[in-house]
Structures are given as C-alpha cells and as structure tokens.
Image (cartoon, rainbow, N blue to C red):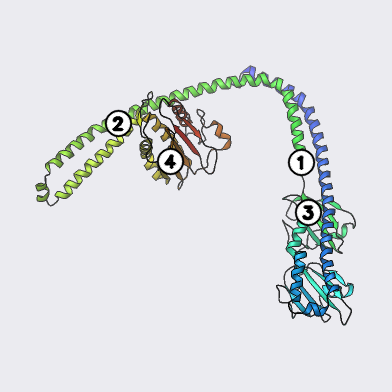
C-alpha cells in the first residue's frame, strides 16, 4: 500500500514543507534550551552557596554551644567535686539532657593520667601526656580537635578545656558523638543524591561521605586552593564518578572545611519547556500538512485490518466447526464400543454367581477386574459426554447449569497438560452455588480459554487458582495466575480481535475476543482486573438468562 504513487507524492510534499517550517523552529528551541540550562545551573549554584553558609553557621553554633557547656562546667566546679564517685556520671547525664552529643567525660591531670572517667571505654590507666590534643589544650586552654583514632581505635574528636596552670592544672575532656555530628552535617544535603561532609586542612575526611570514601581517608580535594571567608562553588567529578557542583566554606573552627555537594541538575525543567514549545509549534505547523495524509493512510489501514480480521475470524470459525464435528464424530465412534464393552462386562458379572466365584481359585480376582472394567467404561463415557457437550457451538442452548461442575469438567480437559508442565492448579469453589439458566457448552469454552491462557502464562512450578463465589443470583468466577501479567500498554487492547502477547505462531489472538463475545451474548461479562500483584486475574460474571 505504501508503494502507490499518490502516497509517495504526499509524503515527499509533507517532508519538504515540514523541513522548511520546522528547522528554524528547532534552532530557536535550542537557543532557549541553552539559556534555560545556564539559568538553572546558576540557580543551583546560588542555592548551594546559601546552604553552605547557613550550615556552616549551624555547625559553628553546635561546636560553640558544646564548648561553652564544658567551659562553664570547668569554671563552676572544682576538681574535688568532679572527682567524687558518681559525680562525673551525673554531670554527663545532665549535659546530654541539655544537648545530646557527649559520649564520655574525662578529667586528666597535669601528668596526663585520668583523675576520673565515665564512658563506655576503659581509658582510666592510659597516659595522654604526648597526645596532640592534650598538648594543644595545655597551650591554648580550650581546644576542639580534628578527628583521630587515639587509644580507642575508632574515629572521634574531643572538646577539651584546661583549668589552672602547671603543676596544678587539670583538663576536662568531652568526646562528641560522631553519629550525631555526622547527621547535623548531612542535614545540609539538598536531595537524595546530595552529600555534605567536613575535611580538615590536610584534605582528610572528618565526617564520612555518603557515596565514596571513609572517614580519615583522603578526599581528593586540595583545601589550600580554596579562599577563606567566602563560598567557592566548583564543577567536579567525585571519586565514584558522579558529576556534581561542590560548595566549599571554611568553618570558624581552625582547619575544617565544609563541603556541600549536589549532582548537576538534569535540566529536566528546561528540557520540558523547550520540548513543550517545540511540540506546540510542531503541532501547529504540521497539523494542516499532515492531517489529510494521516487521515487517508489511516482509512486504508483500517480497511485492511478489518478485512484481515474478518478473514482470520472466518478461518478460525471454520476450524472450530471442523473441530466440533470431528470431536462429535470421535465421541460417537467411541461410545459404540464402550457400550458393547459395558454390556459384555455386565453379562460376565451376572454369570459369575457366588458359587462360581468360590469354586475358582481366581474367582475374586475375576470379579474385581470385571468391576474395574465397568468403572473405566463409565469414566470413558463421562469423557465422551463432556467432549460432545464441548462440541456444541451453535446458538445459546439454555439449561440449568451447575457452575462448579462446569469448572471441574473444564479442568479435567487440561489436568494432564497442567501436570506435564509442572503447574499447580487450585480449585477454590464455593459450595452450594445455585443452579442457573445459561449455556453450559459456551460457558465451558470461555473457562477453557481462560485456563489455557493461564497455563501458557506461568512457568514450571507456577500456580493457577480458579475461584467461584456467589454474586447475587449469579456467580463470579476468577482465574488467577502468578505469571508475568499483562503489560500496562496492552491492558486496553487485550480483548481486541487478533491481539495477542504471545510469540508469533503461538496464538491467534481470538480466544479472549471470542470469550468476551460469548459472555456478552449470555448476559454476563468478562474483564481483566486491575493490576494488584504478580500475574493476571480474569473475572467472569455469570448472570442467569433473562436477568
């Protein structure tokens, strides 16, 4: 159809006009996109600058408040008071009631040994006279250390305050909870992909980053290149390969640099605006040009689809008629020898009276086998009876139908196939469903199609549940499987003729369409329930005829 001359000509005309009209529009759109992306990046940088400054102030206040608490404690209490048994523990509890940040407290004498200690570690007999924080505190009086391992072997930092002068001086040291401090620092992140951390003047992590690196490891940043007193924002690639904007700001604490990072914006807003402009412009320009062309092509395609659908439906109907006739013929041919076998088995049973059974050493075995033959004949008759019922595909034949019995008979057709595929089928049938006026044969076709589709959908080890429930005067039957389900983009088309999600050659796409038509004709309905989990759930509502 696409080779017809007038279609080729209409396409050439459409391409020519569209190129002449749309090229300037798209050039204009790219200029807008460039402007918007630059504006978006500048806005993101400004947000990072403000956030870095505000967070630096919050961290500075946090450290100043904790330092002030320790200083007040040193100035207001004597060494004798704080050294009393249990007193330091009371002080630690009071401090944590005021500001939950302290892990332990220790009083260290001028010789570097603990005078008193309370906390989770055993540090009482350790000497700190050579520790950096101890020497710095003795010189400066008040000192907030960098993060270090120390005797604990875990990263931490301390706030230490000296009281008095040598040889009578002593130091009160408080260890800050690193987890609480890290949470405070990370509260500066803008989004789920943002990050905030602190490094020292040597470029080592003082708080752990979220995505790559560990505390006290090199951060890959040169702090010496960053100015003091103002925020610096740079575009850089992190060690884990993320493209980010990083804001750097020196804290008031000597030697600590706050780093706030945010992944570069995806420019989704700018792209959305440009796409909207281009889409609107393209729609206005292209609408008049493409309307007639699309309308013409759609008409031809619709006619071709209708013709193909009718041909396929006729072919499928012919196959169903042939299959029904063949099934009926086979059933009739089997019924005749079955009747003869049943009659002969009954005759033999009548001839075998009690005396004959007792007289023969194998008499009981003969009689048991005759009974088994009759049982299997009855079973075969039931199969042919169901086969004859399935073969009747004419106009609705109204009769009183037992829904549960129809479901059981339908399952018996595919029971062996389910076992062969390794699929477990569960029949959850509500007892006591009332008989209702409907067409048993056509209901059986609907149930068979749905069960066959469910078996195709699940893999080996899968599960299919057939459930029946009372629904007013009628019944509601569901077929649920744990297969991959129906894709969202196919749910609206699942009942269209010749639409199938199976691989080519594995399905005609008519089963659900025919089943839907049958249920409409019988006064009920067939629908696919909304997606509520794995697999698909089809619901059949059966209404009594005339309701």
Residue 536 appears at what percent x and percent y?
51, 40
Give the Cα separation between the discs numbered 3 and 1.
22 Å
- Chain-order first, disc 1 or disc 2: 1
2 vs 4, front mark: 4
Residue that badge 2 annotates: 330
Quarter of the view holding residue 211: bottom right
Which image quarter: residue 390? top left
279 or 431, which lies in front? 431
Q: Which residue is mark 4?
A: 466
Residue 135's disc is none
Q: In the rendering, which numbered label is found on residue 188?
A: 3
| Picture quadrant of residue 470 | top left
Q: CA distance from mark 1 to mark 2?
A: 70 Å
How many residues crowd mark 4 within 10 Å: few (<14), some (14–19), many (20+)? Answer: many
Q: Is there a contact, CB below 8 Å, between mark 2 and mark 4?
A: no
Position of 91 with respect to 321 (left or right) is right
Query: x and y percent of residue 153 in the render?
Result: 72, 71
Q: Are marks 3 and 1 in contact (CB under 8 Å)?
A: no
| Residue behind mark 1 | 267
- Which one is closest to the eye, mark 1 or mark 2? 1
Q: Quadrant of the N terminus?
A: top right
Q: Is residue 75 above or below residue 236?
A: below
Tell me what residue is drawn at x 80 percent, y 60 percent. 198
Which one is in front in this view, the residue at disc 4 or the one at disc 1?
4
Q: At numbered mark 1, what does the secondary structure look like: helix, strand or loop?
A: loop
């Amino acid at each position: 159809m696409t080779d017809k001359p007038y279609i080729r000509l209409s396409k050439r005309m459409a391409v020519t006009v569209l190129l002449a009209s749309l090229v300037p529009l798209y050039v204009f759109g790219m200029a807008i996109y460039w402007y918007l992306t630059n504006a978006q990046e500048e806005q993101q940088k400004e947000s990072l600058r403000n956030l870095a400054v505000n967070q630096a102030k919050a961290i500075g206040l946090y450290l100043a408040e904790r330092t002030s608490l320790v200083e007040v404690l040193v100035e207001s209490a004597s060494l004798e008071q704080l050294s009393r048994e249990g007193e330091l523990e009371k002080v630690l509890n009071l401090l944590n009631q005021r500001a939950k940040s302290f892990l332990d407290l220790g009083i260290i004498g001028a010789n570097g040994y603990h005078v008193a200690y309370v906390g989770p570690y055993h540090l009482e007999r350790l000497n700190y006279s050579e520790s950096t924080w101890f020497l710095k505190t003795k010189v400066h009086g008040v000192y907030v250390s960098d993060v270090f391992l120390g005797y604990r072997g875990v990263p931490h930092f301390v706030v230490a305050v000296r009281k008095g002068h040598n040889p009578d001086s002593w130091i009160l040291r408080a260890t800050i909870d690193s987890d609480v401090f890290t949470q405070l620092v990370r509260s500066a992140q803008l989004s789920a992909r943002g990050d905030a951390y602190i490094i020292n003047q040597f470029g080592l992590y003082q708080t752990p980053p979220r995505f790559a690196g560990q505390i006290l490891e090199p951060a890959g940043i040169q702090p010496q290149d960053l100015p003091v007193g103002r925020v610096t924002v740079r575009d850089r690639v992190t060690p884990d390969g993320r493209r980010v904007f990083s804001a750097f700001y020196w804290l008031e604490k000597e030697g600590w640099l706050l780093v706030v990072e945010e992944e570069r914006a995806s420019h989704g807003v700018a792209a959305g605006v440009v796409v909207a402009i281009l889409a609107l412009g393209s729609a206005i320009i292209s609408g008049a040009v493409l309307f007639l062309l699309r309308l013409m092509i759609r008409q031809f395609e619709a006619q071709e689809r209708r013709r193909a659908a009718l041909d396929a439906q006729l072919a499928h109907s012919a196959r169903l008629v042939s299959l029904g006739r063949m099934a009926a013929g086979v059933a009739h041919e089997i019924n005749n020898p079955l009747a003869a076998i049943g009659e002969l088995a009954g005759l033999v049973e009548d001839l075998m009276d009690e005396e004959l059974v007792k007289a023969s050493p194998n008499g009981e075995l003969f009689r048991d086998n005759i009974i088994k033959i009759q049982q299997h004949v009855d079973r075969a008759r039931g199969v042919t009876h169901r086969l004859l019922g399935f073969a009747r595909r004419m106009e609705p034949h109204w009769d009183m139908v037992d829904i549960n019995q129809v479901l059981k008979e339908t399952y018996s057709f595919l029971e062996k196939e389910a076992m062969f595929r390794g699929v477990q089928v569960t029949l959850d049938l509500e007892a006591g469903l009332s008989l209702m006026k409907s067409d048993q044969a056509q209901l059986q076709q609907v149930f068979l199609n749905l069960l066959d589709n469910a078996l195709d959908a699940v893999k080996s080890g899968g599960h299919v549940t057939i459930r029946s429930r009372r629904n007013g005067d009628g019944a509601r039957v569901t077929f649920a499987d744990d297969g991959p389900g129906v894709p969202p983009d196919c749910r609206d088309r699942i009942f269209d003729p010749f639409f199938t999600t199976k691989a080519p050659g594995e399905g005609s796409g008519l089963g659900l369409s025919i089943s839907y038509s049958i249920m409409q004709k019988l006064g009920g309905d067939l629908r696919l329930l909304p997606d509520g989990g794995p697999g698909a759930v089809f619901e059949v509502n059966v209404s009594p005829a005339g309701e």
